[in-house]
Image (cartoon, rainbow, N blue to C red):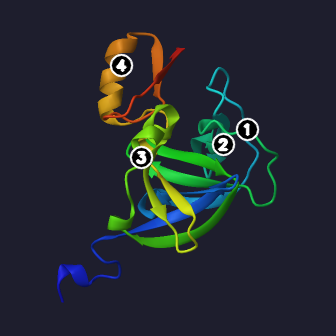
């Protein structure tokens, strides 16, 4: 039995899929810690508009990002399908508010393509790939490092040098070929 004989093929990716409005999005399942119902949140003063608030999850304080606002979509009333996807990153855990969680999909890595160049400007940099589902609909795959405040270590180093002391730098897009913006907020 070789290394490639595991449950997931070597070229497959498992994604937790969810909806924001009529669109379908996905996150790598390895970054998802758990999915919970929408709790009451405490708003953090002077935080960016897309930060929905803070959550105390079993003694751990987590910032919660409203993905609708992060993606520039209009806010909607939260309902019984609204969920918070708890994701893990090296620098900590975050919550992501989504309209509804759909499924866990296994996709061939070759079936996930880079977004077209025209779609890679500004906040579209948050999407690292696009795949066509069996239904014919498109599934956009989020780049978790670009999605969350703090971005990638490369961006923090670049942004920190520009921002100087006394400022928090929140990347709004990943580093790379695509145009990217930074939001600076006084500390």
The percent position of residue 86, horizontal first and vertical second, equals 56, 53
Q: CA distance from mark 2 to mark 4?
A: 27 Å
> Can you identify the residue that label 3 sits on?
116
Q: Pick out the residue farthest to the top.
A: 165
Q: CA distance from mark 3 to mark 2?
A: 22 Å
Camera-nearest label, 3 or 2? 3
Quadrant in which residue 130 is drawn = bottom left
Residue contact between numbered discs 2 and 1, judged by CB atoms under 8 Å: yes
Q: Which mark is first along the chain, 3 or 4?
A: 3
Q: Pick out the residue farthest to the left.
A: 2
Q: Secondary structure at mark 3?
A: loop
Q: Which mark is first along the chain, 1 or 2?
A: 2
> Can you identify the residue that label 2 sits on?
68
Q: CA distance from mark 3 to mark 1?
A: 24 Å
Using the image as rendered, state which of residue 36 and residue 176 is in the foreground.
176
Q: Pick out the residue farthest to the bottom.
A: 1
> Can you identify the residue that label 4 sits on?
160
Q: Is residue 16 visible?
A: yes
> Can you identify the residue that label 1 sits on?
74
Q: Which mark is first along the chain, 1 or 3?
A: 1
């Amino acid at each position: 039995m070789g290394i490639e004989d595991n449950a997931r093929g070597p070229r497959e990716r498992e994604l937790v899929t969810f909806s924001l409005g009529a669109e379908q999005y996905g996150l790598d399942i390895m970054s998802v810690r758990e999915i919970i119902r929408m709790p009451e949140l405490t708003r953090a003063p002077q935080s960016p508009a897309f930060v929905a608030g803070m959550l105390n999850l079993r003694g751990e304080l987590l910032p919660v990002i409203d993905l609708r606002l992060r993606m520039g979509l209009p806010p909607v009333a939260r309902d019984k399908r609204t969920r918070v996807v708890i994701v893990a990153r090296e620098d900590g855990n975050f919550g992501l508010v989504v309209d509804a969680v759909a499924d866990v999909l296994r996709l061939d890595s070759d079936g996930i393509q880079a977004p077209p160049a025209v779609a890679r400007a500004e906040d579209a940099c948050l999407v690292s790939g696009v795949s066509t589902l069996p239904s014919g609909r498109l599934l956009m795959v989020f780049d978790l490092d670009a999605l969350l405040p703090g971005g990638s270590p490369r961006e923090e180093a670049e942004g920190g040098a520009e921002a100087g002391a006394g400022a928090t730098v929140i990347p709004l897009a990943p580093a790379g070929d695509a145009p990217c913006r930074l939001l600076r907020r006084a500390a």
